[in-house]
Amino acid sequence: MIQYFICLLAVKSVFSAPVSAPDVLEEDFEMPSFNLKPETHEEEFVRMDQDKNKQLNFGEFIFMDLAYVIAKKEEFDMLDANHDGIISQKEYQDHYRSVQTQSDKLRQQYFSSVFEEFDTNFDMQLSGDELVNVLAERFLVRPRSNFPKIVYSFDKDHSEYMEFDRKFPFDQTDAIPNAQPRSQPKPDTFKQNFMKQDKELQKLF
C-alpha cells in the first residue's frame, strides 16, 4: 500500500544498528584533529588583534575560538577548488551541487535496497504485511494492534501514498527480543523499472 516508501526510514536507518551506514556521507568533511597548545588570554588577544591596534572589532573577535578557525579554514580550502585564496560563486555552487548529487545517489540506493528486500510481489508498492517486515528486519520492532489505524492516518488523500517520512510513531512499536538483523542486499541488482520512478521518488524530499 505504501508507494515509493518512506524518507523516515532512510534517516532513521543511519542511527539504527540493523542498517549499514552509507559508504559516503552527504558532506564528506572531516573535522581536523585538534592538538592545540593552550593559549593564555593575553596570547589569545594578540592572535585576534590582527591590525595590532590593541583593540578588537567584531570581525577580529569572532576568531576567538582557534579550533573553530582551523575548522573553517579547512572548509574554505575544500570549497576553494583552484586554491587561489578566493571562493568564487561557481566553486561554491559546484561544491554543493556535487554534495546534493551524492546525497540523491545514496538516497536512491537506500530506497532500492528497501524495495529489493521487502517488495516480495514486485508491484513497486509496500503492503501492510511488507511494511511489518520492514519494521521487524530493519528496526527490530513490531507494531501493536493499532498499526492499521496508524498506517491509514498517513493516507490523507486516499491515494495510497503514506507520508511516513516525518511522522511515523516508533513509540507505538515494541522491540523484538533477541532479534538479529539480517545482512542487507546490494541495491545495484534491483529491477530496472524502479529507477524509472526516480522523479516520483524525488517528490518525497
Image (tube, helix red, strand yellow):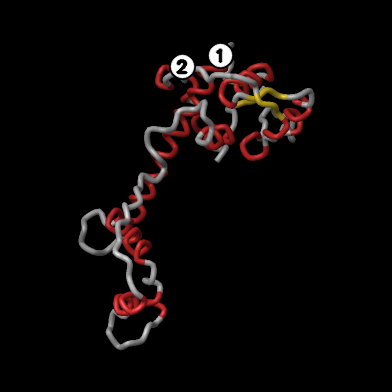
Callout 2 crowding tier (Cα within 10 Å): few <14, some 14–19, many ≥20: some
Left or right for 69, reference 196: left
Marks 2 and 1 close (CB-CB < 8 Å): yes
Q: Is residue 25 above or below residue 37?
A: above
Q: Nearer the viewer, residue 53 or 193?
A: 53
At which x and y percent is residue 15?
52, 36
Instruction: From the top left corner, tell me how far across and down residue 13 is, in percent.
Output: 53, 32
Give the distance between the C-alpha atoms of the residues marked 2 and 1, in whole angstroms: 9 Å
Q: Secondary structure at mark 2?
A: loop
Tell me which amino acid carries mark 2: Lys
Q: Residue 132, located in which quarter of the rendered image?
A: top right
Residue 127 at what x, y percent from top left?
66, 19
Q: Quadrant of the C terminus?
A: top right
In the picture as drawn, the residue positioned furthest to the top comes out as: 121
Left/right of residue 113 with respect to residue 52 in the rendered view: right
The residue that appears at 73% across and 31% down in the rendered structure is 172
Quadrant into which the N terminus falls: top right
- The residue positioned 54% from the left and 32% from the top of the image is 16
Identity of the amino acid at label 1?
A: Phe
Question: Compared with residue 106, is residue 79 higher up or lower down, i.e. above or below?
Answer: below
Asked where in the image residue 38 lies, by quadrant, the reply is: bottom left
Q: Is residue 79 left or right of residue 154?
A: left
In the image, what residue occupies the spot 67% across and 39% down?
167
- Looking at the image, tell me whether mark 2 or mark 1 is earlier in sequence order: 1
Neighbor class of circle 1 (other Cα within 10 Å; few <14, some 14-19, many 20+) is few
Q: Which residue is mark 1?
A: 122
Viewer-closest of 61 and 126? 61
Pick the residue in front: 95 or 136.
136
Question: Which residue carries the number 2 mark?
Answer: 191
Element assignment for label 1: loop
Please tell me which residue is depicted at 31% across the width and 55% down the height of the picture. 79
